Image (tube, rainbow, N blue to C red):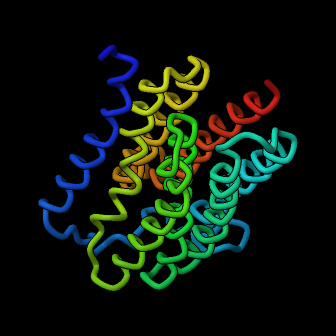
Amino acid sequence: MNSTQARPRVAPFVALALMAALVLSGPIAQPHDYHAFADQRALFGIARGADVLSNFGFLLVAAYGLVALRRGSAADPARPAYAVFFAAIGLTAIGSGWYHLAPDDARLLWDRMPIAVACAALLAATMRDACRGAAAAMALPALVAFGIGSVLWWSWTGDLRYYLLIQGAPLVLIPVLQWQARAPMAQRTAFFIAIVLYVWAKLFEVADHAVLDALDVMSGHTIKHVLATLAAFVLARQFARRSRA
């Protein structure tokens, strides 16, 4: 068997390894002080204004992506997954903005839900590009259902394992899927840049208070929103170029 035939076998094993690692890790609880964001200052009369308004970029990226989708080929098998991805990015702006106005678990549900759907849809789009057959065709509804279920599971049990899985799986599986499919280098580069930006976004999120202490003008969580927006824009830009090809 040559390397081209062997490559499609890699991704399922990686996915199973990720799932097994999280299941065996036991429940992962949300930190008790999760809602205590560093920047509590009002901006333009809006409470926690920087964290609220920094979500606006997601709406712009979503609009850009949906316009590119409308202009693209209807025959693109990944088109439905990208439609869900861009719609979820737009809903992230609304859900996250609403959450940051008055952070609590009830509002956080509507912040996390579109993020989970966006991650699921992006992974499904890559699977549709990399694979063919019934499994690839069913990836979008199956992964979106898993994403929604992961947020509901957290809401009911306090366990973040499956939400973390749907966020982390694309970071690992998308490069593997693109490698096995020998995706164009421009597409692989765009995803690599987006992944790096998203990882940096998560690091700034963890350093929320330390960043505000150091910079004063902006917190780590606000920078997280900016970097995540840039990551989504890189993907939207690559999709727009692909649609014109």
Look at 47% across and 55% down and name the residue there: 221
Q: Nearer the viewer, residue 39 or 54?
A: 54
Q: Is residue 122 left or right of residue 91?
A: left
Q: Quadrant of residue 105?
A: bottom left
Residue, x 78% and y 50% (percent of image)?
66
Left or right of 125 on screen, residue 36: left
Q: Position of residue 191 (x, y in %)?
A: 53, 32
Residue 51 shown left or right of residue 167 in the figure:
right
Residue 119 position (above or below residue 38): above
* Residue drawn at point x = 49 percent, y = 20 percent: 182
In the depicted view, which residue is nearer to us: 175 or 209? 175
Given the current orientation, which residue lies at the most extreme top position? 2
Q: Is residue 192 visible?
A: yes
- Is residue 217 visible in the rendered image? The answer is no
**Which residue sits at x=54%, y=80%?**
102
Look at the picture and state if 52 lies above or below 158: above
- Above or below: residue 189 compared with residue 115: above
In the displayed image of the protein, which residue is found farthest to the front? 1
**x then y, percent, for residue 27:** 18, 70
